[in-house]
Amino acid sequence: MLCSWRNACLQILEQPQFAVNITRHPRRYFSSSPRWNVSKTIPMEEFPRELVRNFSIIAHIDHGKSTLADRLLELTGTIQKKQTGKNEQVLDKLKVERERGITVKAQTATMFHEFAGKKHMLNLIDTPGHVDFAWEVSRSLAACEGALLLVDASQGVQAQSISVFHIAKERGLKIIPVLNKIDLPAAQPERIAAQMESTFGIDPSEIISISAKTGKGVDAVLKAIVERIPPPCGQTTDRLKAFLFDSLYDRYRGVISLISIQGGILRKGDKIASCHTRKKYEITELGIMHPEEVPTQCLYPGQVGYMACNMKDSTEAHIGDTLHRVNESVDPMPGFQPTKAMVFAGVFPVDSNDFPKLEESINRLTLTDRSVTVQRESSSALGQGCRLGFLGTLHMDVFRQRLEDEYDANIIITAPTVPYKVIYHNREVFVSNPTEFPDVTDSATRVKEIQEPVVKASIIVPEEYFGDMMDLCFSHRAEELDHRYLDSGTATSSRIMLTCIVPLSEIVTDFFNQLKSRSSGFASFDYEDAGYRPSDLCKMSFLLNSQPVDALALIVHRSHADAIGRQWVKKLHKVIPRQLFEVPIQAAIGKKVIARETLNAMRADVTAGLYGGHYERKMKHLENQKEGKKKMKKMGRVELPQEAFFDILSSKMS
Ligand SMILES: Nc1nc2c(ncn2[C@@H]2O[C@H](COP(=O)(O)OP(=O)(O)OP(=O)(O)O)[C@@H](O)[C@H]2O)c(=O)[nH]1
């Protein structure tokens, strides 16, 4: 699968609009004066751990991580300076990443840099910036000793800057503060430096000011990486211990794992075992990501690279696993918490005959993105499909786009839901599919309590938008609101950090769009899991001609039920084509209808052929028509066309 993933990337890169200096052969990545002649193997033994630095770049979305990564790769001669003048980034390889300008999948690249007369090996692990991909961030950081904390000098500290800072701090990483985009006219380096001091306790004299776009100051970053980040631990004489921090699937070679060597030397041909699964393997290929694969003979302590070892099934590679030599047991490294899907949605093919193809595409795509959970689902309205679990709505959106771009899938995706906890007298059940949600109005279901997931949200916003943000939070059922000023002293327009507890279900719908529009794009937002809380939730069903449409069911808070019900029947009324008979469109909670619209019948003019004649004759025709329609209505099932589903469900999410 890696190969197909890689091939997909290469195909994308080979398209003229993505023409950058990456090609299939590693040799071509080198500048005209390569440090290493890659036709010979890289002498890995020349890089003892003292000469190795493993680091990551962490920042809020769009603060310039990938741009800085490119400048570092260029400055160290790893890639050629771009001639295209386009903004494409070398490490953002997926089409969706290039189109949206965001990093989704973390990439690794090794650079060689001469400092104080010694060649150093610098391993950069690029990380995504969006809150949905925080799991990738913490996974990338586990293989590093240091991190560049990048802050946009025009935007200042944002919500995600704070959360990634804390992840890095918790992992004990050396943090190098970097102020980026100083070339922008709106940049306020002194003010933002003061903000970094008050928010992170960073000494302003340690901050490096750069422009990743023009390259100004980037050499000082390279110097700081070597001087300030400690070298990794581990000795060549230790027992072999390799930490598996990422994996990909290659159709021909099986699983390719990214590893960091914590101790001992890993050689091609070595027999290794996994602490987690206890399975044994033989290393068939070893190398470094440069940023494409460059094979080597061995990897030494502190080095980061890739390995292939005939792992056939992608589930065998456990992120966070420790690998050791067969018969030489070691203490496993602390692993990662498994990811928890927080947003679920049903995915159905537009043409139900396409289900096998869709399922195959989903399975392939999940091999490159293990945080997605998959379960089969069938709906009477939409046919066979899959219920997928994602880390957040952006994650869901990116997955959908990748399905469409890379696998040509034509799909309908249902409204996102979150996993609710239904507590019965004797058990607890997690429900993420509205069709499985019990009817709480019916005492026979014996539901004791319903709980919903809540998150601790942090919003950073200029003072003038504070009132709007409070309104937004209240209208989304926020509790425990608190705030503090980020800028100390006399700043003219201060920024405020607002924190509150909000139900996750409120965030997965339109919260983010509203946050951006109500703050004119100035607010930034981040959230973390805050457990479950009891909530007054119920299932809302929609009925067309008294028949429930399963794919449209929703789980709503009772206080919002009436408004949502009314809004939805109105929307349905707009998109459902008129039938030969009258169709009631109803929203119901349990057996109680809370909103209704009526779709009038199409009426052929049955009296058109008559001219003159008696009034009674006309009335008789009309009465007959009425009778016929009544019969039709009794038997009639309203088929919702797929386009109507598409309209309803896409507007549901906006
Ligand atoms: N003027 C200016 N623009 C910059 C600079 N650095 C980055 N940019 C621009 O800022 C935008 C975002 O940069 P990226 O490098 O994609 O940001 P990122 O942090 O990698 O974004 P994610 O991967 O989505 O988290 C791009 O349009 C860059 O061209 C800079 O120093 N000056």
Image (cartoon, rainbow, N blue to C red):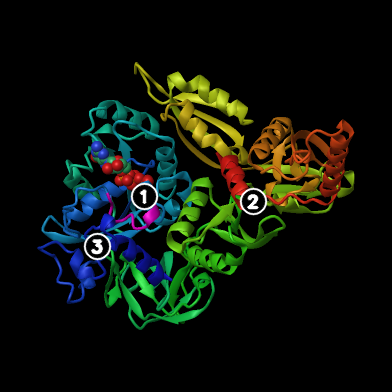
Question: Magenta stretch?
Answer: 88-96
| Residue that carries the numbered disc 1 in the rendered image | 99
Circles 3, 1 touching at the beta carbon (< 8 Å): no
For mark 3, does the 10 Å Cα neighbourhood hold few (<14), some (14 to 19), or many (20 or more) residues? Answer: many
Badge 3 amino acid: Ile
Disc 1 secondary structure class: helix
| Residue that carries the numbered disc 2 in the rendered image | 641
Residue 266 appears anywhere in the view: no
Where residue 601 appears, x then y in whole percent? Answer: 75, 40
Classify residue 259 by image quadrant.
bottom left
Badge 1 amino acid: Glu
Q: Nearer the viewer, residue 406 or 343?
A: 406
| Residue that carries the numbered disc 3 in the rendered image | 22
Q: Nearer the viewer, residue 445 or 580?
A: 580
Q: Earlier in the sequence, mark 3 or mark 1?
A: 3
Q: Give the side of residue 71 with respect to residue 98, left or right.
A: left
Residue 226 vertical placement versus 157 (above, below): below
Quadrant containing the N terminus in the rendered view: bottom left
Q: Give the side of residue 551 with respect to residue 654, left or right.
A: right
Any atom of ligand 1 within 8 Å of the CB at mark 3? no
Badge 2 amino acid: Pro
Mark 3 to mark 2: distance in Å? Answer: 45 Å
Mark 2 to mark 1: distance in Å? Answer: 31 Å
